[in-house]
Image (spheres, rainbow, N blue to C red):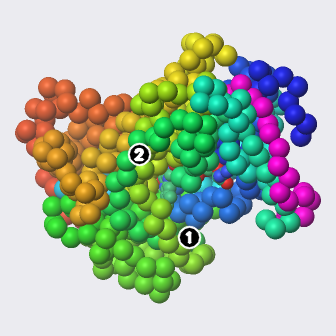
Amino acid sequence: MSEPANPARTAVVLGGSHAGMLVARALSGFADRVVVIERDALPDGPAPRRGLPQARHAHMLWSGGVRAVEELLPGVTEALLDAGARRSPVTTDMVVLGPRGWFRRWPESHHVILAGRDLLDATVRDLVLADERIELLAGTEATGLVGDAGAVTGVRVRTRGAADGREDTAAGVERTVSAALVVDATGRGSRAGGWLQALGLPEVERREVDSGLAYASRLYLAPERARSGYPIVNVQPDPRDGRPGRAGFLLPIEDGRWIVTLNGTRGGEPTADNDDFVRFAREELRHPVIGELLERAEPLSDVSLTRATVNRRSFYERMAAWPEGFAVVGDALAAYNPLYGHGLAVAAQSAVALRDAVRRHGWGSAGLSRRVQRAVARPAGAAWDLAVGQDVFYPGATETGPTLRDRILAAYVGRLMLTATGSGRIARRVTDVTSLERGPQVLLTPTVLLAATAGPLKRPLTGPPLTPSERERAGLR
Ligand SMILES: Cc1cc2nc3c(=O)[nH]c(=O)nc-3n(C[C@H](O)[C@H](O)[C@H](O)COP(=O)(O)OP(=O)(O)OC[C@H]3O[C@@H](n4cnc5c(N)ncnc54)[C@H](O)[C@@H]3O)c2cc1C
């Protein structure tokens, strides 16, 4: 690629994954040219790559995120469904053992999109790169910012070459790409904090809350008659039982496959041992249903294990000084315990927030990047509060443990979860929040408070609410 003709009309996005692609789309039109700089060589279709190890694990996109992606890329849901992704109504197509009992399968309140992560990314990427104003510079690593503490004016990049499995490019060629706005979307491993310090800015305030969760995932081919129209199955821990939190998810995705994730906090971690996977699902979770379903499914992969589950947030929006021409989004800004499935939705909502801030204040206006950083911190902060509010209870997650406020809120959320097992109205309010469609204030209205005081309206279920047909198709008795 040649140096952009007019840097003042150029935006550069670092990282060509979910957040990077959506931000590129959000900036297209404000900038004449958006250059996405991605370290990996990106595959033509849905295929694994080194820079996206989490793609081996289950991913769901909650409807609050689907709405945001649709806003940026109209028709994306249809493209995903055409490619085999599933749209699963919440809680209608969900069999969930919550902390306080089995949820009933209430009429649809919200939905999730289920797909292998590689398919999701390839679909979004194709739609984004169809825009001629967006240019992909793959096999290229961002190594630092150019500018000073007052303004970022570009980024230093280095081509990766034969050493990185690419034969077509000379390795290690370094140069600068100039731009009016550089957005860091390089994920959990972002080096933005250090890059800003190199420009003379102070260290950013960071916080980590680590539940110690280990995440093991494996891909299965579903039993033949359960390959379409099967519900999500999810067994959650009960934080009151004093045991490590162990959970399991079975998500039906494209091509009749199930992606199954088993996880556990300190002292209750799953292993990467293929032979232990079904045993863990049967014996270590609060109910054996996932293990029972797997007995009749065919494994298609080995178990992948990750511990990249710590909640980590950099509070860039609080910095006393912030340079023009720079912003940080996606996991680079805040990464969450994947158990809550919010990272993708937050990245999409942040891209919309960034677009709206640029639209409101004008491309190139003074203080724009500060405004963008504050705008993207809002969706990031909402998901952060949800994740951290629960994870502080795991032993060793923080130095000080939960505060009194954390304990009061958790007691109330526990009561709401119990009520939601036997009240469709409260289940809807709870999923308003978990789907990132609405903020947690909807759980504090007088009607919800009253309903929580009264408790569930229906008797608790005694087992997983699978229909006779679902049981029979999966070979369960
Ligand atoms: C096990 C697991 C399960 C998850 N499940 C869910 C889920 O169910 N639902 C959900 O919403 N979220 C889930 N998440 C979170 C989700 O994966 C992330 O929130 C999402 O990938 C963030 O997107 P991103 O673009 O910010 O970062 P990433 O997807 O991590 O992408 C970063 C990109 O930057 C590139 N890059 C890195 N450094 C450089 C550099 N120096 N120069 C150029 N390019 C660079 C990388 O190659 C990569 O392409 C899960 C995460 C994990 C770990």
Q: Residue furthest bottom?
A: 275
Nearer the observer, 172 or 148 = 148
Nearer the observer, 145 or 312 = 145
CB of mark 1 near ligand 1 (< 8 Å): no
Rendering coords of residue 138 (x, y %): 79, 49
Q: The magenta stretch spans which residues?
A: 165-181
**Image quarter of residue 134:** top right
Does residue 320 show up magenta in the picture?
A: no
- Report the residue at 87% width, 34% height from top: 3
Is 195 left, or right, of 108 in this rendering?
right
- Report the residue at 53% width, 52% height from top: 188
**Whether residue 223 is visible:** no
CB of mark 2 near ligand 1 (< 8 Å): no
Q: Which residue is mark 1?
A: 219
- Report the residue at 36% width, 74% height from top: 269
Q: Which mark is residue 103?
A: none
**Residue kind at label 1, given as amino acid type:** Leu
**Residue kind at label 2, given as amino acid type:** Arg
Rendering coords of residue 198 (x, y %): 60, 42
Vertical comparison of 176 with 339: above or below: above
Nearer-N-terminus badge (2/1): 2
Q: Which mark is residue 206?
A: 2
- SS category of the residue bearing label 1: strand
Q: Check disc 1: other Cα within 10 Å, few if <14, some if 14-19, many if 20+.
A: many
Is 245 left, or right, of 218 in this rendering?
left
